[in-house]
Image: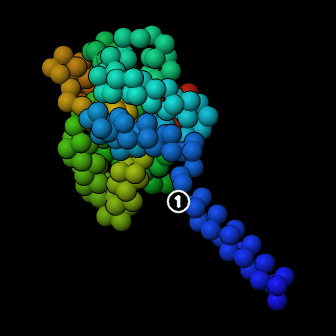
Amino acid sequence: MHDASRADTARALLLLAVAACADQPYKDTDECTRAANALAVCGHVLEQSPFGTCQQAQREGAEYLLEIYASGGCTALADAKTDSWTCSVLPFLCVDHTASELAPFTTDGCTMFPDGTLSDATRWQHCCITHDFAYFTGGPASARDAADHALRSCIAGESNQALADLVWAGVRLGGTPALRTPWRWGYGWTYDPLNGYRTLPGDQTSAAAAAVGSSSACARSRPTSLRCRASTMRSRESPPRCGR
């Protein structure tokens, strides 16, 4: 009985230790979470953490951001963009958009999805290219919502509602500006996870409209002509160009 009692006591102590550890967040992940929380406190609305899954490089960036925040709070974070070393470690803190940064418009049609049927290979491709015009330009969240709903309506008209709903769910999930994907909302601009739904100033709106306008006359037509495809379509096998 004595040995059994000691064994029970040891098991109880082990369970208590495990329970105590369970209350403590994993240190590495906690640093990334605390860094993201500091950004939120300073007014940045985050759909996703800019520190991703908190791998080593991301964790080191989070630690550095926390050091800056501890030294002077939100003011220190705002001032950090004047420091070249900080900008090299945390480039998303230093994004300062200009009209000249806008990349040329490119599209691959319906990203990671067929452009049409076996008998009509580009049946709803024009829906996706029009959608890409909006995603290239970016803007507030309401503009993204409108673009995604327009895509769903367009594909429903060319096919059926079930297919349209599937495509809509995909773009809602994968098109967030918080992730550095070549199809993110606002992909024509420098990656900016802290301000992905920014309202574009007049000169940037005009620059995006000009880039889209030079391609839209061809890209909106169906079927897309070979000349139009040469000017607007990016090969799905080619590497992304200028973030898209």
Q: Residue at x 50, y 39 (%)?
A: 31
Q: Is residue 210 above or below residue 153?
A: above
Where is 210 relative to 163, above or below? Answer: above
Q: Return the x and y of residue 24 as percentages of the image width and height.
A: 54, 54
Asked if 132 appears above or below 103 in the picture, the reply is below
The residue where tag 1 is placed is 23
In which quarter of the view is residue 221 placed?
top left
Q: Quadrant of residue 182?
A: top left
Amino acid bearing label 1 = Asp
Horizontal side of 103 relative to 9 (left or right) equals left
Residue 81 position by quadrant: top left
Residue 177 location (% of width, % of height): 36, 37
Q: Name the residue at the front extreme.
A: 2
Quadrant (top left, top right, bottom left, bottom right) of the C terminus = top left
Q: Quadrant of the N terminus?
A: bottom right
* Horizontal and vertical percent position of residue 118: 49, 54
Percent position (x, y) of residue 105?
Answer: 36, 25
Outermost residue, right side: 3
Residue 69 in view (yes/no): yes
Along the viewing direction, whichever of 242 and 41 lies nearer the viewer: 41
Q: Which secondary structure lies at badge 1?
A: loop
On the question of residue 233 being in view, the answer is no
Instruction: Tell me what residue is drawn at x 22 percent, y 37 percent.
Output: 140
User: Quick one: 69 or 219, which is closer to the camera?
Assistant: 69
Residue lying at 41% horizontally and 11% vertically, measured from the top left: 83
- Closer to the camera in the image, 64 or 72: 72
